[in-house]
Amino acid sequence: MKVVLQNVTKIFPGRGRGASDTVAASNLDFEIPDGELIALLGPSGCGKSTTLNLISGLQKPTSGRILFGEDDVTDLPPENRGVGLVFQNYALYPHLSVTDNITFPLGNLRGKDRMSKAEMKQKAYEIAKLVQIDGLMDRKPGELSGGQQQRVAIARALVKMPKILLLDEPLSNLDARLRLQTREEIKRIQRETGITTVFVTHDQDEAMSISDRIIVMKEGVVQQIGKPQEVYDSPANLFVANFLGTPPINVFSASVKGEKLYIGEDCVLDVKNVPDGEVWAAVRPEGFVLDENGPMKCALDRVEVMGRDISVVSENENSVNPVVRSIISAENRVDISSKTVRFRLKPFKTLLFDKKTEDRVFFGDDK
Ligand code: ATP
């Protein structure tokens, strides 16, 4: 089922005299295609949960419309929208078994949808098998690991076969290893069921690794929507460039003169079709090539071994970040006794942004 948001805005009125309103979501206007897994990504407070709550119906938009397929659901309460919800704190019933937790939403089905106890148990078992907890049906939540509890919560959200599955930071309470494992599980379950899924996270790694498409938000406004690789390779603005990628992108205060990019005195790249002026130049860590005759000079700080790669940590007075982090193949040899290190820049890993608006400035034949 596709989900369409048309000019959706949510404003929370300020409380008390003089308190200003909060625009938690501003003019959201996008379509989530049927069967895709979408990540809503952004820093704390950017409006991710609000967007999810607007889709679920837990919150009503101040203006705009929400459609599921061709149906306008803007005024429908959550229970009539056919959505499954999973929150960060799994909110399982501690005194109920896994089976009873999963079947709980089936208890209030009425009319032709009403199920017998045996049918419910069978259904719970089928869903539990999908999320691989079918061996734990008689346990209570307190007897399960965090990852297992989260799977019960997902099973409970899936048991009524929702049209849309909504997950709000579902992995936050899990330790690093379980997070990795559970996010793969979510991807697998989503693929197997084909349910359109929206996943809220502030973790760019999580968003990049499992989603078909990422929606990046800042202060209630969508910054960019795209496939993970597209958003990484071609960020719309400096905020998106900074938000995606570990280690983060290296940002320099730079200038353009005669279609050449300068970082300080170093003329580092040809940038055809860019007018003269100040810019932000951002280079992905993998965008540096060690080259003793390279145009960019940095003060060598240290070399960190990462196995397959090495990270050359250096300093440059035009860098916005305290250090410049480049990632290069471990086959390269770096003379750590040397005070300086020189690089060449890969053009397609170097991005320019307007100094004021911070929007992308394309160069060469890019667009
Ligand atoms: P986090 O990652 O910290 O959960 P988020 O991106 O999900 O953040 P939201 O919870 O959607 O952000 O909040 C967006 C903005 O709306 C914040 O400034 C928040 O303080 C405000 N907000 C959220 N809910 C309410 C509410 N019920 N009343 C007033 N303001 C609210």
Image (cartoon, grey):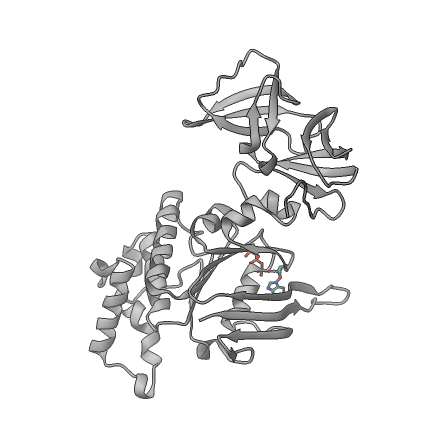
In this rendering, is residue 161 above or below 278?
below
Answer with left or right where residue 82 lies relative to residue 137.
right
Residue 53 lies, in percent from the top left, at 53, 67
> Which one is nearer the viewer's eye here, 184 or 283?
283
> Which one is nearer the viewer's eye here, 259 or 169?
259
Q: Residue at x 29, y 67 (%)?
A: 96
Residue 54 lies, in percent from the top left, at 55, 69
In this rendering, is residue 37 above or below 252?
below
Figure quadrant of the N terminus: bottom left
> Which one is nearer the viewer's eye here, 359 or 164?
359
* Whether residue 291 is visible: yes
Answer with left or right where residue 72 lies relative to residue 135.
right
Q: Which image quarter has ligand 1? A: bottom right
In this rendering, is residue 266 above or below 222?
above
Q: Residue at x 52, y 21 (%)?
A: 303
Q: Residue at x 65, y 45 (%)?
A: 238
